[in-house]
Image: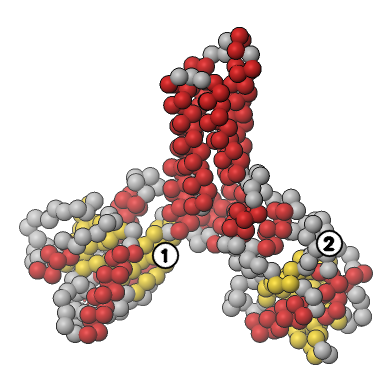
């Protein structure tokens, strides 16, 4: 049983004029009562649950802020504990001061994700739903949000539950075989059933790859010699005049980074300083940062100016060694092209665009998605939002199932197959938050922000 009362500011810092200080625990109402003064002298201890009250928060006889306080009593609350939410109106400073007063009055500062952790411990939500809360808090795009809401609805949990019950059925049949060898259970018939589970896990894994993209997003860097139109392309992609564009080579001296979603995936676009060998110190630093951007990117757009003949600097760009995929972008297609042949190289495709006029830019967007999402655009149903820890476990379930398949096919010893299957079942249970240790719980909830 948890007996301390926790508190935190549960609205994002720096956004909007109202801040909410949230308390959860058996003393939430009592602590709030020591600070709250209603105009009619009413005590929060006497008010009905799920009601909101006007008053002031006072500490050492000083009014800190004018507030609205909601009182929600257990068990119909987010954490299933008593919750008090103090809506402060005096901006960040007042909100912090109210939090300090609450902490002085006996509450403990909540750790990251502790409210949601309590909701889980008190049985209100599943571990999976708790993680979905985290995803919603973090979702940066509409598609990411949809997938998180879906997860909150328990789609991943459902898939795991189905998998576990199928595994349990197979295990039961194996037990019969082990206990009553005379009954002659057909062990060969078991192999395809395990194989089917294994395929299901592989499918979940591949759907989670799009999930990773949605959660973490990708980084696309625009690389090229000076003046080819990199900044112009950034502006066109963002639909705003973010970077300065001039006809003078070397306009961009530093990397410029901006987020904008592409087909529902959060993308960090990086415009870079033109690549060339330089002596000038400032520009040299810019070029160094461009190289840094190349190292961080998931995809490079190698840009050349098609209206000018290929230069040595272009060659330098085209020969760049990168671990990640690239696209060749031949810009200024609105002018006459000076390139007789399109160079070939390691890039996955080459496209003519006019960054200035917008021609070909939509095709470029599609090509970027195609390259990064291996031909499949993520849709709501194709996405499974899971994190690295879960992916590792899911992968382990897959490996254990593959081993179970192998054992079945090789010598068909039912007890050995059962052993492998039991391991897979255990891992799947761990993944679902059944029977897992406190340390794993902490690992999950510490990634939340404080106040959630
Ligand atoms: N005609 C035409 N001009 C373009 C196009 N894209 C860019 N420009 C022009 O090319 C010049 C350079 O554009 P920028 O976007 O500043 O080029 P950059 O690659 O960022 O240059 P640096 O920052 O100096 O490396 C500007 O005068 C742009 O207006 C295009 O598609 N067509
Ligand atoms: Mg530029």
Q: On the image, which quarter does residue 222 sit in?
A: bottom left
Q: Which residue is at 76% across, 86% downward? A: 64
What residue is pinned by disc 1?
260
Dot 2: few (<14), some (14–19), or many (≥20) neighbours within 10 Å?
many
Q: Which residue is at 33% across, 62% downward? A: 297
Q: Is residue 180 visible?
A: yes
Dot 1: few (<14), some (14–19), or many (≥20) neighbours within 10 Å?
some
- Give the x, y percent position of residue 440: 60, 53
Quadrant of the drawing holding the N terminus: bottom right
Check disc 1 and report its element: helix, strand or loop: strand
Front residue of 153 and 448: 448
Q: Which residue is at 49% across, 29% downward? A: 404
Q: Which residue is at 24% across, 56% downward? A: 327
Is ligand 2 closer than 8 angstroms to the Cβ of mark 2?
no
Check disc 2 and report its element: helix, strand or loop: loop
Question: Quarter of the picture for ligand 1?
Answer: bottom left
Nearer-N-terminus badge (2/1): 2
Residue 449 in the figure: left or right of residue 97? left
Front residue of 52 and 276: 276
Against 350, residue 207 (above or below) is: above
Against 396, residue 321 (above or below) is: below
- Give the x, y percent position of residue 49: 86, 63
What residue is pinned by disc 2?
73
* Residues at circles 2 and 1 in contact by the CB criterion of under 8 Å: no
Against 188, residue 55 (above or below) is: below
Q: On the image, which quarter does residue 173 sit in?
A: top right
In the image, which disc is placed on residue 397?
A: none
Judged by depth in the image, the label closer to the viewer, 2 or 1, is 2
Residue 53 in the figure: left or right of residue 394? right
Front residue of 442 and 240: 442
């Amino acid at each position: 049983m948890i007996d301390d009362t926790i508190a935190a500011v549960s609205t994002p810092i720096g956004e909007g004029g109202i801040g909410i200080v949230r308390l959860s625990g058996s003393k939430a109402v009592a602590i709030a009562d020591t600070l709250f003064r209603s105009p009619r002298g009413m005590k929060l201890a006497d008010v009905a649950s799920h009601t909101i009250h006007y008053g002031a928060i006072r500490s050492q006889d000083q009014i800190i802020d004018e507030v609205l306080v909601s009182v929600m009593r257990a068990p119909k609350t987010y954490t299933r504990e008593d919750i008090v939410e103090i809506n402060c109106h005096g901006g960040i400073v007042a909100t912090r001061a109210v939090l300090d007063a609450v902490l002085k009055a006996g509450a403990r500062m909540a750790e990251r994700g502790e409210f949601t952790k309590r909701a889980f411990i008190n049985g209100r939500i599943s571990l999976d739903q708790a993680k979905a809360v985290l995803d919603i808090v973090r979702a940066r795009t509409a598609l990411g949000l949809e997938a998180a809401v879906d997860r909150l609805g328990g789609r991943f949990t459902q898939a795991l539950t189905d998998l576990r019950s199928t595994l349990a059925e197979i295990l039961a049949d194996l037990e019969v075989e082990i206990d009553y060898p005379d009954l002659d259970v057909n062990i060969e018939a078991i192999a395809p059933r395990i194989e089917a589970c294994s395929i299901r896990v592989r499918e979940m894994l591949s759907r989670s790859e799009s999930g990773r993209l949605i959660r973490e997003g990708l980084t696309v860097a625009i690389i090229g010699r000076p003046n080819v139109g990199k900044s112009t392309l950034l502006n066109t992609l963002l639909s705003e005049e973010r970077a300065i564009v001039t006809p003078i080579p070397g306009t961009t001296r530093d990397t410029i980074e901006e987020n904008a979603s592409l087909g529902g995936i959060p993308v960090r676009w990086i415009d870079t300083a033109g690549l060339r060998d330089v002596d000038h110190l400032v520009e040299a630093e810019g070029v160094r940062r461009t190289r840094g951007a190349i190292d961080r990117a998931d995809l490079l757009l190698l840009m050349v100016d098609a209206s000018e003949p290929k230069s040595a600097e272009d060659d330098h760009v085209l020969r760049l060694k990168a671990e990640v995929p690239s696209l060749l972008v031949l810009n200024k297609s609105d002018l006459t092209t000076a390139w007789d042949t399109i160079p070939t190289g390691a890039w996955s495709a080459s496209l003519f665009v006019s960054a200035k006029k917008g021609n070909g830019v939509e095709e470029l967007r599609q090509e970027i998605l195609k390259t990064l999402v291996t031909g499949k655009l993520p849709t709501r149903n194709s996405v499974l939002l899971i994190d690295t820890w879960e992916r590792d476990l899911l992968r382990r379930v897959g490996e254990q199932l593959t081993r179970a398949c192998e054992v079945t096919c090789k010598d068909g010893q039912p007890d050995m197959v059962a052993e492998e299957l039991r391991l897979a079942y255990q891992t799947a249970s761990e993944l679902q938050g059944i029977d897992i240790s406190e340390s794993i719980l902490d690992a999950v909830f510490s990634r939340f922000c404080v106040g959630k």
